[in-house]
Amino acid sequence: MGTIISPPSIVCKAMSEFINDLFMNNSQRQHCANYLTGLLVGGNKTVTGITDELLNASDQSCLNRFLNSIDWDHEKLNDARINWLQNNDTTCFNSRGIIALDDVLIEKTGSSIDDVGYLYDHTQKRTILAHDLLFVHYVNMKNSKHYPLEFRRFKKESQCTEEEVDFKKQTELFRELVGWCNQ
């Protein structure tokens, strides 16, 4: 992939319409725009890959710090994103829309990543190192537009025991997502 010179128009529009207000300074806003750009159009979706492909990106450690150490409210950002989607006739909720639940394994290569574990992937018929993400997704049946609403990350019982945190089965996490939809 070549160098990405500027964010796509959808990122610029989102930044100006709702994202800029959610961050404390221009550096945080720029990191957010870079991250979104990398996820949308970058070839390598890792922090290093995103910063390598963007012309205006600082060192990967800055983006990594933004994602992991800066105190920003991801729930507020997600709520603003969903509200923003309601302002467009093609993405707003409607009576023909449905809510879909999905369980997705995202293969990883580093075992030091939070909550990654060896899980059985029935599509590949083998065990892989992955994150197990459970999504609630909105699907507009009128025009086939769809987008994620919220997610939960499954953690294996052995990891929860080791970290001394409560274990939640996938069914419990899906119930949480259904409850989130009913808010």
Image (cartoon, grey):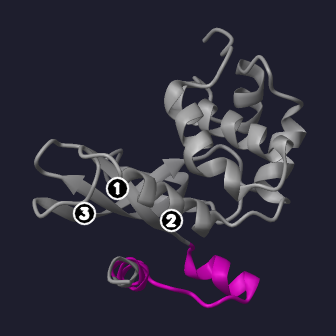
Is the C terminus in the top left, top right, bottom left or bottom right quadrant? bottom left
Q: In the picture provided, is 9 more to the left or to the right than 116? A: left
Where is residue 154 drawn, in percent x and y?
A: 52, 71
Q: In the picture provided, is 49 more to the left or to the right than 96? A: right
Q: Earlier in the sequence, mark 3 or mark 2?
A: 2
In the image, residue 57 above or below residue 102:
above
Q: Callout 3 environment at 10 Å: few (<14), some (14 to 19), or many (20+)?
A: some
Q: In the picture provided, is 94 more to the left or to the right than 167? A: left
Where is residue 15 drawn, in percent x and y?
A: 61, 41
What residue is disc 2 on? 79
Residue at (69%, 54%) from the top-left corner? 21
Identified by mark 1, the residue type is Gln
Q: Is residue 29 magenta?
A: no
- Spatial CA distance of label 3 from label 2 is 18 Å
- Spatial CA distance of label 1 from label 3 is 18 Å
What span is colored magenta in the figure?
155-178
* SS at badge 1: loop
Which is nearer the eye, 182 or 168? 182
What residue is disc 3 on? 100
Identified by mark 2, the residue type is Asp
Residue 1 visible within the image: yes
Q: Quadrant of residue 48?
A: top right
Where is residue 108 drawn, in percent x and y?
A: 60, 46
